[in-house]
């Protein structure tokens, strides 16, 4: 308990922008220790942001801090020990990374020259999206609140990445070398294709939707081959797997700043919109949370405009208090 309180205090210092290098290194080790730790860190982040909602200066500084964190997340794994962490080391390494506008990362071979046992980590914070181009030409779009990890050996000893959250993959074909995505529920094996994977730690399901090519979902002793237009959903708690025919292109709508779902519950949509717009949407009853409907928002609407549109689709009332949004009948 004491250790949790100490890490929480360090996290608050981080959010406030006045953390020491030693404490920042300790926080980094904690966050990357497990999915549970990462989820706890994000809960602390939300609590802090809710407390500072009315302070525009603090919020602006926080956005800048989160962008710096994305650079740090990619670079710190290159440092041999957290105790050796310093911004001088980061400054020396970050020149190996080309960061362009819009949260786009391109990684060159030199990134890993002296760090063959390290992991690269890329994050799309809540309210933002990122695009990562891997050394083999594979492109990954990360949805809000998502993390992509892979080894320095990527492309040399296979092509394995780990995903927490949601990613849209456009995998470059490479002879005699498959591409694998590990999630908390199952693994996806491909040779060259386009597909979407959603595996947020707080969601009940892990879902893969195939847009082009072919993939194989590996779950325990089962292998499930997929064809374009199919979606495979795993209920993580029960282990139940469902295969559906869907309009697969809609699964990647988020990467084009669109909201499109043919059949979604209000509770599921609230979770997605909370991440996308960096707000906290609370559905006040299970009955309305289980309402199912279709939604298509093709422009870059604000969260208020989205809520207004939802009220025209389903019989709900919406109340907003800063970043807190309450939905009831």
Image (tube, grey):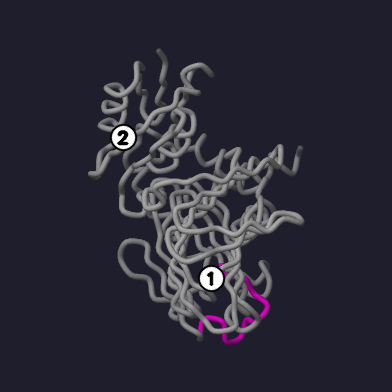
Q: Is residue 296 magenta?
A: no
User: Which quadrant of the rendered structure holds the C terminus?
Assistant: top left
Q: Which residue is at a point 68% across and 71% down the rendered structure image?
A: 81
The answer to whether one can see residue 50 in this image is no
Mark 1 nearby-residue class (10 Å; few <14, some 14–19, many ≥20): many
Q: Position of residue 152 (x, y in %)?
A: 61, 78
Q: Residues within 10 Å of mark 2 (few under 14, many from 20)?
A: some
Q: Residue furthest left?
A: 299
Query: Element type at marker 1?
Result: helix
Residue 294: x and y in percent read: 36, 33
Which residue is nearer to you in this view: 184 or 91?
A: 184
Of 125 and 233, which appears nearest the observer?
Answer: 233
Q: Which mark is residue 75?
A: 1
Residue 181 visible in the current orientation: yes
Residue at screen point 50% across, 59% down: 227
Q: Is residue 268 above or below residue 83?
A: above
Circle 2 sits on which residue?
Answer: 303
Question: Which region of the structure is painted magenta?
Answer: 110-120
Coordinates of residue 93 in the picture (x, y in percent): 50, 78
Image quadrant containing the N terminus: top right
User: Residue drawn 48% across and 78% down?
Assistant: 173
> As displayed, is residue 269 above or below residue 24?
above
């Amino acid at each position: 308990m004491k250790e949790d309180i100490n890490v929480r205090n360090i996290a608050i210092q981080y959010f406030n922008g006045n953390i020491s290098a030693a404490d920042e290194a300790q926080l980094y080790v904690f966050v990357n220790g497990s999915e549970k730790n990462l989820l706890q860190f994000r809960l602390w982040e939300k609590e802090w942001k809710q407390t500072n909602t009315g302070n525009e200066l603090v919020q602006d500084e926080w956005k800048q801090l989160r962008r710096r964190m994305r650079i740090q997340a990619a670079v710190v794994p290159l440092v041999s020990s957290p105790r050796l962490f310093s911004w001088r080391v980061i400054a020396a390494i970050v020149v190996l990374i080309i960061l362009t506008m819009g949260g786009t990362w391109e990684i060159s071979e030199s990134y890993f020259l002296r760090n063959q046992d390290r992991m690269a980590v890329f994050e799309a914070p809540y309210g933002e999206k990122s695009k990562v181009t891997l050394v083999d030409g594979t492109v990954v779009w990360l949805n809000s609140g998502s993390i992509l990890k892979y080894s320095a050996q990527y492309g040399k000893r296979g092509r394995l990445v780990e995903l927490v959250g949601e990613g849209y993959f456009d995998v470059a074909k490479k002879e005699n070398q498959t591409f694998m995505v590990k999630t908390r529920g199952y693994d996806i094996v491909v040779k060259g294709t386009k597909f979407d994977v959603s595996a947020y730690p707080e969601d009940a399901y892990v879902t893969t939707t195939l847009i082009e090519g072919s993939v194989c979902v590996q779950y325990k002793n089962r292998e499930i081959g997929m064809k374009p237009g199919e979606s495979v959903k795993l209920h993580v708690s029960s282990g139940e797997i469902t295969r559906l025919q869907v309009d697969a292109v809609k699964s990647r709508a988020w990467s084009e700043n669109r909201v499109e779902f043919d059949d979604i519950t209000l509770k599921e949509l609230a979770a997605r919109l909370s991440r996308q717009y960096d707000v906290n949407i609370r559905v006040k009853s299970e009955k309305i949370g289980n309402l199912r409907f279709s939604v298509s928002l093709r422009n870059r609407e604000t969260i208020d405009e989205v809520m207004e549109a939802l009220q025209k689709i389903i019989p709900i009332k919406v109340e907003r208090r800063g970043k807190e949004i309450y939905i009831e009948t």
